[in-house]
Amino acid sequence: MSNDSLSSTEQALTVNDYLDCLQVVMVNTTLPANIGSAARAMHTMGLSRLTVVDPKLPIDETSVSHAAGGSELLSSAVIAPTLESAISDCQLVFAASSRSRHMPRPVVTSTQAAKIMFDFIDTQSALSANNNVDTSSDAVSSKPNIAILFGREDRGLTNEELAYADYHVQIDANPAYPVLNVASAVQVTASFIFAYAQTHIQMADTVETDLSIATQSAFEVHLRQQWDEPAITQQQLQQLIQRTTDLMVQRGLANSEHLKSLPSRLSRLGSRLQLDQKEYQLLSALIAKLSKD
């Protein structure tokens, strides 16, 4: 893909166009007031898509009172039964995490996350425009869809939930107690995204941000620069993981009763590869053939 294609796409997109591709996903919240505070934080920073996964208590009047000007976000919020259903059509997933976990993903700062998000939107939007992608298919959305996951008030996201993310986002904080209230975490992350949005639409191809300077993470961040086709969704990635696992069990390469970390490792591998639709079709055909032989 030429730089000219990406440049024209960047110039055509507004700040709101970028922000509309992002959704905040709150997982298993305890207090309805925190949902309202998060909605207010989002509205302040131009984000409008809120998904709440299996809340312990429903959105109520305390949510509305804490939302202030962001009450419309509550009325349009999606209530999802599971995290899988909430992010099934997302092509890129970030998760807020205050500490390193078992088998972690690449760790980035909020500013780095914003750059990754906006560069991804540029690339995917250019592909859709240049290739005349048929957006009527369930597998390909009319615009990029990116999720940012936030966990429970008392313990954040589980290892299994963090495994769905392509990147983990950590906010610089006091190392003795780096834990933010969930609404505060939404506010800080959204603030960095909004600040980055103001400059991104003016950058085009003239400014390159050095991601390696701003982080002390031990995990190197690898970004795919080009796709031949739009990126696969989280649902498609999970399907590949399941089919690969089933094939390995069938061929005696894995024990169905003792899979251990196999699904998580396959998930991390899939995130690192950042597959596109054509690659997904090739791997699906290969797995289907091997399963029959």
Image (cartoon, grey):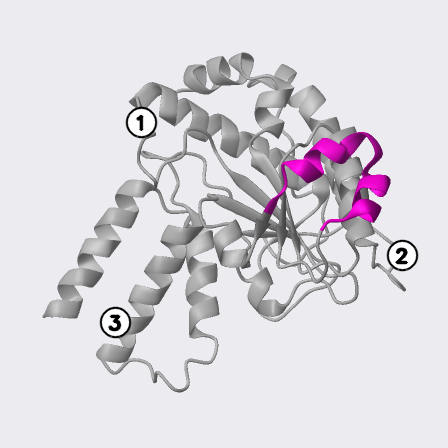
C-beta proximity under 8 Å, tags 2 and 3: no
The Cα–Cα distance between marks 2 and 3, rounded to whole angstroms, is: 46 Å
Where, quadrant-wise, is the N terminus in this rendering?
A: top left
Name the residue carrying label 1: 133
Q: Outermost residue toward the left?
A: 293
Name the residue carrying label 2: 174
Which amino acid does the dot numbered 2 rest on? Asn
| 236 to the left or right of 292 | right
| 288 to the left or right of 278 | left
Whether residue 221 is visible to the viewer of this picture, yes or no, is: no
Residue drawn where x is 17% and y is 69% of the image: 291
Tag of residue 70: none
Q: Which is nearer the eye, 240 or 269?
A: 240
**Is 248 a magenta residue?**
no
Which of marks 1 and 3 precedes in the sequence? 1
Which amino acid does the dot numbered 3 rest on? Leu
C-beta proximity under 8 Å, tags 2 and 1: no
State the image coordinates of residue 231 (x, y, percent, origin top left). Answer: 39, 40
Where, quadrant-wise, is the C terminus in this rendering?
A: bottom left
Name the residue carrying label 3: 247
Q: Which is nearer the eye, 75 or 13?
A: 75
**What element does badge 1 sit on?**
loop
The Cα–Cα distance between marks 3 and 1, rounded to whole angstroms, is: 31 Å
Total tally of numbered discs in the picture? 3
Which of marks 3 and 2 precedes in the sequence? 2
User: Magenta region, mostly helix, strand or loop?
Assistant: helix
Which amino acid does the dot numbered 1 rest on? Val
| 110 to the left or right of 232 | right
Magenta region, residue range:
59-78
Residue drawn where x is 38% and y is 44% of the image: 232
**What element does badge 2 sit on?**
loop
